[in-house]
Amino acid sequence: MKIQVINPENVFKPLKPTYSNVVKVEDIKSLVFISGQVAFDKEGNIVGIGDPEAQTRQALENLKACIESVGGTIDNIVKVTFYLKDMKHFEAVHRVRAEYFKKNPPASTLVQISQLVHPELLVEVEAIAVV
């Protein structure tokens, strides 16, 4: 699989180096859709109540486990969508994202929403990957 990240000169440069405006994928084998992951541990307990960094890290660890379950890695993710309960957590989320998306950062959407599945959850992330 060949992944090419593109940030066209005539389009606003990404605010953070953790995403790309365009991700082109060639030689596709399998397209994988990963449901929204939140800060639940494997027993269903919320990790990091009140802590957006801890919750983002747990959600991304869950995402990583999902992609690894089909033989991929975090580098196979080509698109993510982040849902935040409060945009004030933007910087905290991006600090953690930078730990995970180092090579070929995926295309990304980040939006603020009013509620997640549990009132203590602050962030959710879903992904599309090519394996």
Image (cartoon, rainbow, N blue to C red):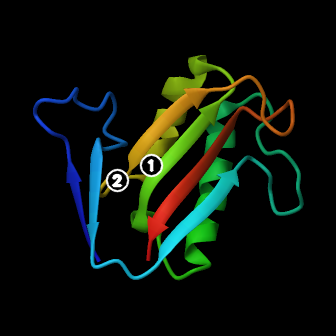
Residues under labels 2 and 1: Cα distance? Answer: 7 Å
Few, some or many residues within 10 Å of mark 2 (<14, 14–19, 20+): some
What's under tag 2, amino acid-wise? Lys
**Residue lying farthest left?**
9
Drawn side of residue 20 relative to residue 109, left or right:
left
Nearer the observer, 54 or 1: 1
- Whole-percent x and y of residue 64? 57, 64
Q: Quadrant of the C terminus?
A: bottom left
- Whole-percent x and y of residue 23? 29, 54
Nearer the observer, 130 or 90: 130
Q: Which residue is mark 1?
A: 99
Q: Are marks 2 and 1 in contact (CB under 8 Å)?
A: yes
Q: What element does badge 2 sit on?
A: loop
Q: Quadrant of residue 85?
A: top right
The mark found on residue 102 in the picture is 2
Q: Is residue 105 above or below residue 111?
A: below
